[in-house]
Image (cartoon, rainbow, N blue to C red):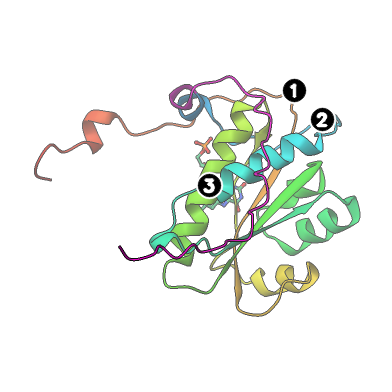
């Protein structure tokens, strides 16, 4: 009988289990999320931020390449600089946290980075936070923000997500009806 070769593998580090704080189901979170652009001064605990980033890194990606890196910016000075650099992201100056999602310049970097961004927006909402997607990719300020945050070359800024608690409630934007956008079998 052939002898089995035992491959000795280095023990992998114990997975870090993040405590889940939200209790909103996914469909409710998707249905009730709104872009909110004003925040109060309540600080966001680091474990909440980690849970949100964790949701980002679990997003699907083409060939499971996972090209993303997430930079969390809490320093007011840096957020103010980012706010100045952007055109429609001035409210980043007032958000206690901003997550910048960068992706390696892979074939599907944009799709992958957007999937991660949406996961984070939904999770943030489920955790009781307000936030808004601020454009990264295609904006003239991408390089400037990458430079400010010390990002190595060949990474693309996909999005900025200012986050925080908010006292503001906003009305839902008009969304096209399901019957208008759903086509069974053929367009
Ligand atoms: C790719 C993308 C880029 C966006 N960029 C900005 C932005 O730069 N500034 C901003 O205030 N909102 C931005 N938004 C948020 C949209 O304005 C918002 O999602 C849209 O008006 C619908 O509102 P809702 O998110 O409440 O459903 C962006 C959203 C997406 C998906």
Residue 145, position as x, y percentages in the image: 73, 67
Quarter of the image where the N terminus is located: bottom left
- What whole-number distance in Å separates the C-alpha atoms at marks 2 and 3? 29 Å
- Tag 3 residue: 58
Q: Is label 2 in contact with label 3 (beta carbons under 8 Å)?
A: no
Residue 125, position as x, y percentages in the image: 61, 30
Quadrant for residue 135, please give it. Answer: bottom right
Q: Residue at coordinates 81% horizontally, 48% vertically from top-left?
A: 93
- Tag 2 residue: 40
Q: Is label 2 in contact with label 1 (beta carbons under 8 Å)?
A: yes
Q: Would you say 33 lies left or right of 152 here?
A: left
Residue 30, position as x, y percentages in the image: 47, 30
**Camera-nearest residue between 133 and 124:** 124
- Tag 1 residue: 167
Q: Residue at coordinates 55% horizontally, 35% vertically from top-left?
A: 122
Please provide the residue range marked out in magenta: 1-28
Which SS does the magenta portion mostly show?
Answer: loop
Secondary structure category for the residue under label 2: loop
Q: Is residue 76 above or below residue 3?
A: above
Q: Which badge, 3 or 1, is on the more N-terminal residue? A: 3
**Camera-nearest residue between 124 and 46:** 46
- Residue 103 numbered mark, or none: none
Q: Which badge, 2 or 1, is on the more N-terminal residue? A: 2
- What whole-number distance in Å separates the C-alpha atoms at marks 2 and 1? 7 Å
Q: Which badge, 2 or 3, is on the more N-terminal residue? A: 2
Secondary structure category for the residue under label 3: loop
């Amino acid at each position: 009988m052939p002898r089995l070769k035992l491959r000795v593998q280095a023990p992998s580090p114990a997975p870090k289990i993040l405590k889940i704080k939200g209790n909103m189901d996914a469909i409710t979170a998707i249905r009730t999320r709104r872009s909110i652009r004003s925040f109060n001064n309540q600080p966001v605990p680091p474990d909440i931020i980690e849970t949100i980033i964790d949701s980002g890194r679990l997003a699907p990606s083409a060939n499971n390449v996972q090209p993303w890196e997430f930079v969390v910016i809490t320093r007011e000075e840096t957020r103010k600089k980012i706010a100045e650099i952007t055109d429609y992201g001035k409210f980043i100056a007032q958000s206690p946290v901003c997550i910048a999602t960068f992706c390696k310049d892979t074939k599907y970097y944009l799709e992958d980075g957007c999937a991660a961004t949406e996961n984070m927006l939904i999770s943030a909402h489920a955790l009781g936070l307000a936030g808004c997607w601020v454009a990264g990719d295609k904006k003239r300020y991408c390089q400037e923000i990458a430079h400010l945050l010390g990002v190595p070359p060949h990474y693309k800024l996909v999005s900025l997500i200012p986050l925080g608690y908010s006292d503001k409630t906003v009305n839902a934007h008009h969304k096209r009806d399901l019957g208008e956008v759903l086509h069974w079998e053929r367009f």
